[in-house]
Image (cartoon, helix red, strand yellow):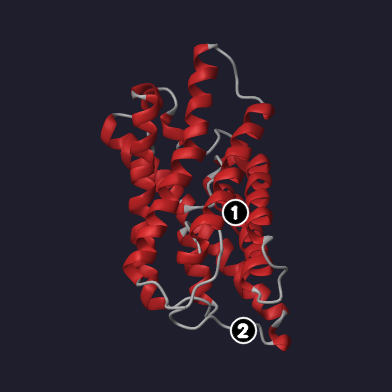
């Protein structure tokens, strides 16, 4: 089977990331509108619904574009795979660009669905630190979240010995579980492109965005994902986990 061109794979990554942002942060933005209009606070049940939306779209993307792109749809995942030899470094830049562009398009998609309420009230589901969460703490929390995700990805999608056809379900549910745990303190991004898109569009359309916090959602996820990939490779180093050839790809996730 011929390997799809880099352009086609990047195009797929852009689509996947756009749909991730549209459905995931879009659900968070819609919930923000509902709670604001009803003068209510966000509950754990609300977070559960948002988590489930993320889980669904991650599973859907893995099973639909995973064969084409590997379905990274997350710069931290791409960098972590490259750092352990499972993805060619020369393709990292194009993948990251595609993911960030896709995240921005997805954020515009939220506006098309929810209108300006999605920006001014729902803030396009942009991630922010809770008032009680410090900057370094936020980086640490985001690193933990990305570590969990990447460790699972290595085990169920990258490792050739993983059970077949279960990767999408397991990774999607893992994403949902992580969001339930970390949504309160950081907004549960663990994906720089997922945060980048809403930040850009919010800024362009008059939303309330604090770009000072953006490095939290870049440094933390990359640190955590790379650490997980390196640790997994070290644990199984004696078993010689196979590397992906330069022009190959695996189904991954968020």
**12 and 242: which is toward the camera:** 12
Which residue does the numbered mark 1 point to in the structure image? 140
Residue at the spot 67% in from the left edge and 49% down from the top edge:
173
Would you say the residues marked 1 and 2 are in contact, meaning their CB atoms lie under 8 Å apart?
A: no
Any mark on residue 242, and which? 2
Q: How many residues crowd around disc 2 within 10 Å: few (fewer than 14), some, or many (20 or more)?
A: some
Query: From the viewer's perspective, is 35 left or right of 75?
Result: right
Name the residue located 68 percent from the left edge and 27 percent from the top edge. Answer: 45
Judged from the image, the secondary structure of the residue bearing numbered disc 2 is loop
- The answer to whether any part of residue 128 appears in the image is no
10 Å neighbourhood of mark 1: few (<14), some, or many (≥20)?
A: some
Specify whether 104 is left or right of 61: left
Cα separation between marks 1 and 2: 30 Å
Instruction: Report the disc number at residue 156.
Output: none
Secondary structure of residue under mark 1: helix
- Give the x, y percent position of residue 223: 54, 63
- Ranked by sequence position, the earlier of labels 1 and 2 is 1
Above or below: residue 172 compared with residue 81: above
Give the residue at x 39% y 52%: 15
Q: Which residue is drawn at the image coordinates 28% and 31% (left, top)?
A: 205
Q: Quadrant of the C terminus?
A: bottom right
Name the residue furthest left. 204
Query: Viewer-proximal residue, 13 or 101?
Result: 13
């Amino acid at each position: 089977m011929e390997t799809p061109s880099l352009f086609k794979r990047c195009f797929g990554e852009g689509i996947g990331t756009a749909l991730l942002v549209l459905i995931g942060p879009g659900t968070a933005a819609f919930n923000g509108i509902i709670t604001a209009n009803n003068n209510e606070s966000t509950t754990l049940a609300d977070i559960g619904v948002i988590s489930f939306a993320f889980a669904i779209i991650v599973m859907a993307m893995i099973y639909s574009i995973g064969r084409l792109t590997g379905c990274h749809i997350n710069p931290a995942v791409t960098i972590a795979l490259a750092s352990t030899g499972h993805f060619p470094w020369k393709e990292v830049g194009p993948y990251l660009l595609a993911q960030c562009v896709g995240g921005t398009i997805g954020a515009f998609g939220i506006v098309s669905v929810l209108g300006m309420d999605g920006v001014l009230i729902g803030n396009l589901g942009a991630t922010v630190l809770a008032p009680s969460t410090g900057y370094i703490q936020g980086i640490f929390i985001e690193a933990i979240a990305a570590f969990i995700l990447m460790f699972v990805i290595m085990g169920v999608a990258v490792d050739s010995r993983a059970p077949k056809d279960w990767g999408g379900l397991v990774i999607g549910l893992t994403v949902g579980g992580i969001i339930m745990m970390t949504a309160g303190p950081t907004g549960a991004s663990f994906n720089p492109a997922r945060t980048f898109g809403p930040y850009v569009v919010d800024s362009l359309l008059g939303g309330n965005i604090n770009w000072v916090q953006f490095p939290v959602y870049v440094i933390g996820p990359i640190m955590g994902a790379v650490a997980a990939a390196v640790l997994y490779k070290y644990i199984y180093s004696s078993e010689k986990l196979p590397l992906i050839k330069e022009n190959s790809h695996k189904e991954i996730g968020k």
